[in-house]
Image (spheres, grey):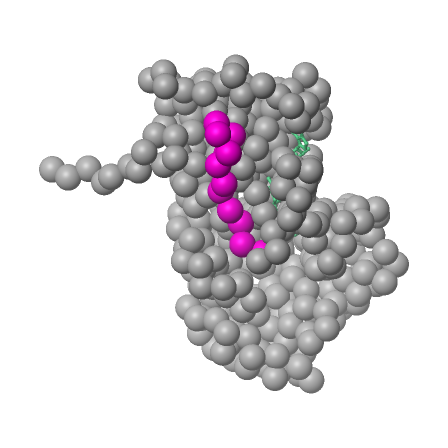
Amino acid sequence: MAPSPEILVRGAGVAGLVSAVSLAERGAHVTLSEIGDRVGAGASWMAGGMLAPWCEAESAPDIITQRSVSAVEWWKAHVPETIINGSLVVAPPRDTGELRRFARMTSHFREIGASEIGQLEPDLGDRFSRALFFPEEGQVDPRKALEALKTRLVSLGGTVCLNDTARHDDRLSESNWDYIIDCRGYASRHQRPSLRGVRGEMLLLKCPDVTLHRPVRMLHPRIPIYIVPRADHIFMVGATMIESNDDRGITLRSMSELLNAAWTLSPAFSEAEIVDIGTGLRPSYPDNIPAVTREGRTIHVNGMYRHGFLLSPALASEVCDIIFGVEHPQTS
Ligand SMILES: Cc1cc2nc3c(=O)[nH]c(=O)nc-3n(C[C@H](O)[C@H](O)[C@H](O)COP(=O)(O)OP(=O)(O)OC[C@H]3O[C@@H](n4cnc5c(N)ncnc54)[C@H](O)[C@@H]3O)c2cc1C
């Protein structure tokens, strides 16, 4: 292999961009090919951007938690706008049993009462008497973070090809490249037949009457939701988790559930403007665990499920180790 391997990364979602930047930082010549007209043309555009290894332990196996604890650090180093204000988990009074269940499944939180909820989130203080606060968790605005990674890749000498139909063919010849990194998400299903889509619907609300400083999860036995604050009083409300490959627009039922939940969190959302509505298919393997798999000179990074932002740095590091060998810390 040449000292600077020539690498084609297919797909400019979060898996592709994080892999491309990580490879370029290790000295590879990277071409990033995206069939859409922008970076993040797939599921990554719809994401909440929560970097929440400890909250996710509620439903994810230990391996996900172990592999995601360094994600906040990676994002902070690559996207300075990464916010580390923690996450808050609340439940309406009738569902406080859900809060106890969530606490049993997770760690790295402290239980707080109304007065501390009010200090952290003045707009919620009088609405909830108990909450779990996970101080080490963070968030990115996915759309801005993906753009920032694109800029970083170009500054490292990488090439980004949008609307790239020239390289979309599945029979793409490996011989032109030292490695091909396939990060096409759900579009890779013909090569990876065990991949399925897990449909996620989301809304963006604009609401100058509400201020939140961190992602807030509101537990409910049937419809748990979260609200992630972004700049300029924009709030991402998400997300459904539906076993379906159907990527049509949001259903009336999902829309009303997300809106009702936002309203329950704070009635001030009733005057919010709905500025975006989206549906994404989370590319998922049967065990919901993302994986790096190698076939010749093609390396597949896929199955990111609901953890694309959380786990891409760990998977990209695995790809780098395959190509460059494991990096050992310097000793003096
Ligand atoms: C509503 C919602 C909320 C979420 N919230 C979070 C969260 O808070 N935190 C978190 O960590 N994860 C979250 N996720 C999960 C996360 O979004 C996914 O795990 C992640 O986006 C998957 O990334 P990917 O790069 O594998 O796939 P994608 O983002 O789908 O990217 C694949 C890319 O490949 C491109 N492509 C397809 N075919 C070709 C081709 N032939 N040639 C070139 N390019 C091609 C596509 O256009 C697309 O841009 C959420 C998901 C959803 C739907």
Whether 296 is among the magenta residues is yes
Q: Position of residue 237 (x, y in %)?
A: 70, 57
- 243 and 84: which is toward the camera: 243
| Whether residue 182 can be seen here | yes
Q: Quadrant of ligand 1?
A: top right
The foreground one among 216 and 272 is 216
Q: Is 84 left or right of 329, judged from the image as shown?
A: right
Query: Quadrant location of residue 59?
Result: bottom right
Residue 126 percent coordinates (x, y): 63, 77
- Vertical placement of residue 24 versus 216, above or below: above
Q: Position of 101 compared to 43: left or right? A: left
Is residue 232 visible in the rendered image? The answer is no
Q: Residue at x 66, y 44 (%)?
A: 193
* Residue 279 percent coordinates (x, y): 76, 48
**Count of numbered tags:** 0
User: Seen in the image, is 27 located left or right of residue 278?
Assistant: left
Q: Quadrant of the C terminus?
A: top left
**Residue 127 lies in the magenta stretch:** no
Residue 282 position within the rendered picture, expressed as x and y whole percent measured from the top left: 66, 49
In the image, the segment drawn in magenta is 288-299
Above/below status of 94 relative to 264: below
> Residue placed at 83% from the left, 52% from the top?
250
